[in-house]
Amino acid sequence: MPLDQRESDDAVMSFGDHLEELRKRLFLAAIVPLPLAIGLFFVAPQIRAILTNPVLDALRAEGLPAQLQVMSPIESLAVDMKLSLIGAIVISLPWVLFQAWRFISPGLYAHERRFAHFLVLLSTVLAASGLALMYFAILPLMLRGLIAMSGNIPTLVEVTPASEAIGPTLPLLTTDPAAPAPGSTWVNTTEHTVRVAVPFGESGTQAEIVSLPLVRPGTLMQVYHLSDYISLIIMLALGTALSFQVPVVTLLLGWMGLVDAPMLRKWRKFAFFGALVVAAIVGPGDMLSLILLTGPLYLLYELSILLLVFAPASRVARGAVTRGLVGLDRGESNERSDER
């Protein structure tokens, strides 16, 4: 298929046909998010638990109660609705983009479709990689560092042997007992709480475990709200996904002739320094966090150079970059068939 050939004769349509096709694609794109949001609402508590695990782990690591506060009776419900709506938008985004693609692709030339295929694939891989890095590496380090900097200094004292203790003492357990006696009290050292088994029901055969958080003495009490934390996670995820599009933007600038690989190679030291500064500002400040944050940021810069070298506009237009990937370049295979 020549580079200047459109996908089919259907690319030439009247204005009324275009409006009808647009109406059809908008309808198909709109019918998916709402049912998906309703379905996700029933699993929103599980999604919320996954998102709150990093901050709860960070609180435990700093010797604080692993709890988040809700400030109103509807806050938890509102958070679940927010998560279900955002999740529906994210999950249905490929379907929406597919409908948009079905609307515009008949009017595109073969080389223009190859550019779109390559950019969509690259952008998706980069965004997914950035979100995975944020959740499993950046977020735990950042939360632990921020919580440590905002907390009170631990009050450490000398201890005496248990046999010489004056007054009652509570047993220190890493997990709650499976069948505690009613009224028994202990300290859960993992959750940093005092637990009490309170009789539940009239039969007296069951007990409910209630807890009291243990906090360090001082002028600051770290109490985090569920809605604020979820909003923070959403903003971080959005910022990470956008920041990982730097290679895509750089590649577009290279295709436009504004930058090239030799120019970026000359700026390597400045790029590394910029990544170091950003990591120092965003991260908690320790050496491990600095390395883990600086590395990915600088690797994005190096990836931009590699893309400019191995994916110039001429190769992408011919389909040489995406050749061999299933379904990405059907036009290229058709072109070779026509040549034979």
Image (cartoon, rainbow, N blue to C red):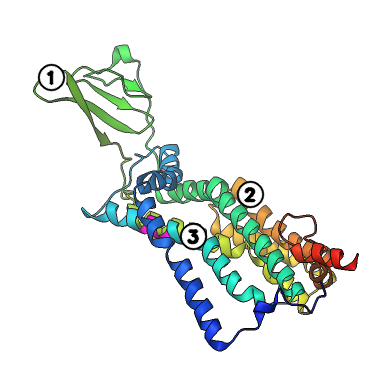
* Count of residue discs: 3
Q: CA distance from mark 3 to mark 1?
A: 50 Å
Residue 174: quarter of image: top left
Residue at the farthest left position: 202
Left or right of 242, for residue 32: left
Q: Provide the secondary structure element on which disc 3 rests.
A: helix
Q: CA distance from mark 2 to mark 1?
A: 53 Å
Residue at 51% across, 58% down:
237
Dot 2 amino acid type: Leu
Where is residue 105 shown, x and y percent of the image? Answer: 65, 73
Tell me: residue 161, above or below residue 306: above
Q: Which mark is residue 315?
A: none
For label 2, the residue is 292
Q: Earlier in the sequence, mark 2 or mark 3?
A: 3
- Foreground mark, 2 or 3, reads 3
Dot 1 amino acid type: Gly
Tell me: residue 242, above or below residue 153: below
Residue at 77% across, 75% down:
255
| Residue 315 is inside the magenta segment | no
Where is residue 39 shown, x and y percent of the image? Answer: 37, 51
Dot 3 amino acid type: Ser
- Identify the magenta region: 82-86
Residue at the farthest right position: 340
Left or right of 228, for residue 4: right
Where is residue 173 shown, x and y percent of the image? Answer: 35, 22
Quadrant showing the C terminus: bottom right
Left or right of 84, for residue 256: right
For label 1, the residue is 204
For label 3, the residue is 92
Residue at 22% across, 55% down:
72
